[in-house]
Image (cartoon, rainbow, N blue to C red):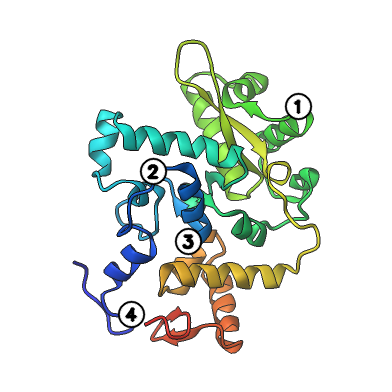
Amino acid sequence: MRPCHPWVVEDLEKARARRWWQTRTHLGRIDRAARFISDVGFCLLFPKTGIELPSLWEAASDRPLMDAVEAWSGPDIDRVWQWKDELPRRGLAWYGEFVRGRKSFLSPQLLSDLYPRRGHPTDFTDAPLSDEARKIARILLRSGPQSTAALREALAIEGSRGAERFNRARGELGRALVVTGYGTEEEGTGWPAGVLELTARAFPIARKRHLEASRLRAARQFLDTMIVALPRDLGNAFGWGATTARRALEELVGRGDAERVGPAFRLPGAG
């Protein structure tokens, strides 16, 4: 068990396990998976050593992840792998490379609070994107949801180096919340290809939002899910940077919606 610092709640590991649904009956249906994501607000698809964040896998299975991945079989891995395609396609959760730049989910509410632009399908023109990322967004705007195979063909980037370029562009679009996963499409006899769609077309995002109020709601959700967190934890998770994260957390303290615990922050009474 990790040591408990004096400024965190007692036995943080167990408290987070409860908060992250790891002590409940494992998720067995997609509607419960959607409720889990709605409750925690954000989670990784799979856990990552050294990154303390909730994950869909750990709420759905107590099987060690490496055992499941190496075998790449079994009801748990099949179920979670299907959910990561179906949840965004049904509008139940956003999916892409956002939280810590890793494959992750956002609840529709947290997505709306984190979305940094106007909420219109064309608003990616305001995002700082590379040429290839912007081309992908333009193709999606013009042609609707497209498989990754079709997008790579349209961009004429093939081979292993082409795959690396495409993956960089897709990650960039995910971190900017421009696109979301949107199911899969069969491609011959191989694995189905993932489908991408513009986030602002796949999910309802309020056009009239007070961005600072939205940022504070997102910061509060982070504290509620993490129980206790440092500014850098929030900044790294949502790509804000430590300065912006600290400003948001201190604003919550000023409003009485959070409290300091040494160098960290938590919701009032969370201990």
Q: On the image, numbered disc 2 is attached to which residue? A: 28
Q: Secondary structure at mark 4?
A: loop
State the residue at coordinates (59%, 88%). 254
State the residue at coordinates (80%, 43%). 122
Q: Determine the image quadrant of residue 145.
A: top right
Kind of residue at badge 3: Val
- Label 4 to label 1: alpha-carbon separation: 50 Å
Q: Nearer the viewer, residue 16 or 33?
A: 33
Q: Secondary structure at mark 2?
A: loop
Kind of residue at badge 4: Val
Residue 143, disc: 1
- Label 3 to label 2: alpha-carbon separation: 17 Å
All told, the count of numbered labels is 4
Q: On the image, numbered disc 3 is attached to which residue? A: 40
Residue 8, disc: 4
**Residue 147 position within the rendered picture, expressed as x and y whole percent measured from the top left:** 60, 25
**Of the residues tagged 3 and 4, which is closer to the observer?**
3
**Of the residues tagged 3 and 2, which is closer to the observer?**
2
Disc 3 and disc 2 in contact, CB within 8 angstroms: no
- Label 4 to label 2: alpha-carbon separation: 32 Å
